Amino acid sequence: MKINHTNYFKDGVLIQTDNMQTVFTFSNVNISETFALDEKGMKILTKFKNPKIVLDGNIVKASENGITAKIKTAVSLWSETDLTQIKEVANSHKAKCKLGTLKKAIAFVSKNTNKAILQGVNISKNYVIATNTFMLFREKNIIQDENEDDFNVTLSSEFVAALEGDNEEIIEIEFNTNKAKCVIGETTYIGRLLSGDYPKTEKLFTYPIIDTLLITPEDVKDLLKYTSDEKNDIIAFNNDLIEIEGNISVVKQNDTKIEIEKGARVSCEYLKTAISVIEEKDLESGFFIKIGFSQNFIFINDNILIMQIVKQGE
């Protein structure tokens, strides 16, 4: 069991949601009593592994190994009708994608509330996409059935973050105009959809690559650990040097030269985000990250794009 803002036990099911009620989860549990707990009460209950539960008025007695906790219940928020309506996704369509791809994408969503559609992850039959306008993640969707209907839907980052399971699993998402539902194992997840048209990004991946650098993830991580201000420091690729530009300058000599006129400069924070989602199976020749340099962007392993901050000398 996990701790959430609202935790409601009913007929062997634990219903949970955050304080804004943006994501609901319905999980099977070995507790048959009906009661609700707030966040503090749930934190105490989760200290027990397999407690005996006795409900005494507005007190839950949880006992195990000679220890008994008396936890005050909270007010239940929902009626049976409410719960039925929460779980129902009327006039629904279906979408499929790999869970691990969704999980990687949420690192790239926008935190800007003025661009609500960019606060989610867009999935279609072809791609899973997320962007904050300064960096963009796009990974080909894995659909096992070529006859699958087309779909295009933007899931909230809160919904994607709540999903738990095997990252290699192909999950099915049921959705309508404003709601998404996903069942993984014995847990049902309900979340909101983001309305509006997700920006077209296809043309960004057609920019010609001027030069390419192969570098190990370890070399990038070793350099990035020297940043003194990750959010504001810049990493500059220029000929055979890779330099952190900030309050404290750090330079790494690279064996390979890159022939980029005036160099390429990108955010240390964004580069670190891009590196963090690269898996071992995605490495070139089993060892290297491929960084492709275009006139206005750098491409990480062809599927992550980072906007160049500015060209050196301008």
Image: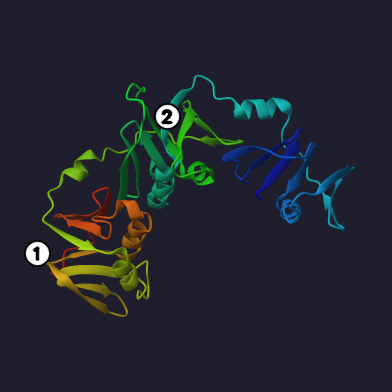
Residue 79 drawn at (x, y percent):
73, 29
Identity of the amino acid at label 1? Glu
Q: Which residue is mark 1?
A: 259
Identify the residue at image location x=67%, y=29%.
83
Kind of residue at disc 2: Ala
Res 174 visible: yes
Q: Which residue is mark 2?
A: 95
**Could you tell me residue 277's position as x and y percent?**
37, 54
Number of numbered discs overlaid on the protein picture: 2
Relative to 167, does residue 310 appear above or below in the rendering? below
The picture places residue 150, in percent across and down from the top left corner, at 34, 25
Location of the C terminus by quadrant is bottom left
Residue drawn at (43%, 45%), measured in percent from left and top?
A: 100
Residue placed farthest to the top in the image? Answer: 91
Out of 308 and 2, give the one closest to the viewer: 2
Callout 1: few (<14), some (14-19), or many (20+) C-alpha neighbours within 10 Å?
Answer: some
Quarter holding residue 64: bottom right
Q: Is residue 245 above or below residue 83?
A: below
Where disc 1 sits, the SS reads loop
Q: Residue furthest bottom?
A: 248
Q: Is residue 235 left or right of residue 152?
A: left
Tell me which label, 2 or 1, sits earlier in the chain.
2
| In this picture, residue 302 sits left or right of residue 31 | left
Which residue shows up at 52% across the image and 42% down it? 163
Where 92 sits versus 278, above or below?
above
